[in-house]
Image (cartoon, coloured by chain):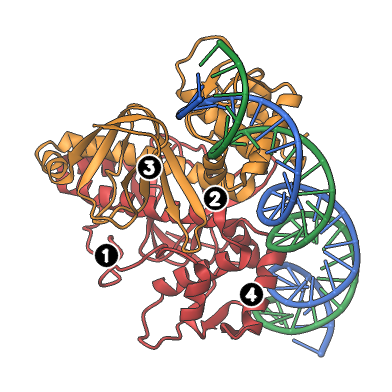
Chain colours: A orange, B red, C blue, D green
Amino acid sequence: VRHRPDSLLFQEGDEAETCYRVLSGTVRLYRLLQDGRRHIVGFAVAGRFFAWDDEDRYSFAAETVSEVVIVRYPRAQLDALVVAQPELAWRLLALARKELGAARAHALMLGRKTATERLATFLLGLAAEEPRDGTGASHIELPMGRADIADHLGLTTETVSRCLSHLRRDDLLTFDGQRRCRLVRPAALRALAEGGPTVCQERMPAGAVADRAAPPFAA
Amino acid sequence: VRHRPDSLLFQEGDEAETCYRVLSGTVRLYRLLQDGRRHIVGFAVAGRFFAWDDEDRYSFAAETVSEVVIVRYPRAQLDALVVAQPELAWRLLALARKELGAARAHALMLGRKTATERLATFLLGLAAEEPRDGTGASHIELPMGRADIADHLGLTTETVSRCLSHLRRDDLLTFDGQRRCRLVRPAALRALAEGGPTVCQERMPAGAVADRAAPPFAA
DNA sequence: CGCGCAATTGACTCATATCAAGATACGTGG
DNA sequence: CCACGTATCTTGATATGAGTCAATTGCGCG
């Protein structure tokens, strides 16, 4: 099924009768606080499943960011398949584990990282999903607006914008239009992204363990 | 197995060969950034399993908070059981879903709530795990110190302390020793906890903590 | 009973939010 | 194809919640 940008797929609390897979485009998954504060749980890009986890009601809402093509699978069918093929359950479990890891990395970020560190983490996460071009400098596409990024990272659009400018001034990345950029020194970004643990997915070859002492202070 | 307070069970990155179940006491699960900033993923209390999800290496470290009694299950055995009993896979999947929901609620909190709102959310979460005494005012036990709470909520000990004092001044709760308190007006707290959705553990008909009924992994 | 660590409280700083303009990109219609 | 209008992004000035530094208090324990 094809959808125009910014159209609602379902809301938090709706009957969870279908789960989805993205074929192309980007979908934002989010929750709201009653006063309107929004938190974007994550972005689903091509190839990703979402809404396969909820018991009964969706635990978040989903909206398209860009033009999107998705497939819808009835939940009942999925459940039946899982019962029929035990191996599938194993697969789902693995998926769940990955998502759990991602959710926890995200929480760590929200709880303990500065604005610039969050941006670095986010950009590296996106870069990791882009086709590897072998060269160090990956260039990435930001399908979502600054406001979406802000709500994902627990910041404001202004802060996101400022930090991006800041990273640009420090030559950690360059822009090529507002929504396309190139990571110039991924290593530096990675250092910024943390003082820390392996985030979303990549394994850095071996231990690059630095000393724990210096407060972060984004330069 | 019995452990003294503040003893290390395993570290982030260790071979994940065993998973655990808490019989009594409280365990803190945390991750560190290289510069030492700590984020407490969660607290495992009596009845809870932890470290059952990781692929290969632990994705967080675990330390006892209070005196703790735990059971250790070899991972290999667990995996074998899962293969043998497809139904068990289903159980684990359900557990994973619950944890995912909790992790996301936590992320929402870290990203978009104020210090006081976080405290309120946290206290309500604890209250929900306490035996229901029917009356509105539940009284809860805080096994962990302020520093632990702070690292769980993405705050500092000072802020935690200040917010608790603040809640006390507003008569939302009373203290009975530093680590025991009583929620006087849960409704008000809940309102504070959000402007928002039902957080960590909404309904759960019988406070059944998924595990309760699970056959011991022991063999 | 007094020692010591944890918690509270206070004064001040700093990062990020908020408020407010500009600047840039983009779609639309002339 | 260009001019305009609008939405998004950037930048600046200021406000503020939470962090930091620094005592002080009080509980818990030997």
First in sequence: mark 4 or mark 2? Answer: 2
Q: Nearer the viewer, residue A73 or A196?
A: A73
Asked whether the residues under the numbered discs 4 and 1 touch, taking CB atoms below 8 Å apart as contact, a structural biologist would say no
Image coordinates of residue D30 in percent, x first then y, are 70, 76
Q: Nearer the viewer, mark 3 or mark 4?
A: 3
Marker disc for residue B164: 4
Q: Nearer the viewer, residue A55 or A200?
A: A55
Relative side of D7 to B164, left or right = left
Label 4 vs label 2: CA separation?
23 Å
Give amino acid for label 1. Answer: Arg
Label 4 vs label 1: CA separation?
33 Å
Image coordinates of residue C30 in percent, x first then y, are 50, 25
Q: Nearer the viewer, mark 3 or mark 1?
A: 3
User: Do dots 2 and 3 share one subunit?
Assistant: no
Quadrant of the rendered structure where residue A116 is?
top right
Write down the residue under mark 3: A63
Asked whether the residues under the numbered discs 3 and 4 touch, taking CB atoms below 8 Å apart as contact, a structural biologist would say no
Q: Nearer the viewer, mark 2 or mark 3?
A: 3
Image coordinates of residue B49 in percent, x first then y, are 36, 55
Q: Chain of mark 1?
A: B
Q: Residue at x 65, y 17 (%)?
A: A184
Give amino acid for label 2. Answer: Tyr
Q: Secondary structure at mark 1?
A: loop
Label 3 vs label 1: CA separation?
38 Å
Relative side of A169 to A141, left or right = right
Q: Nearer the viewer, residue B185 or B54?
A: B185
Write down the residue under mark 1: B212
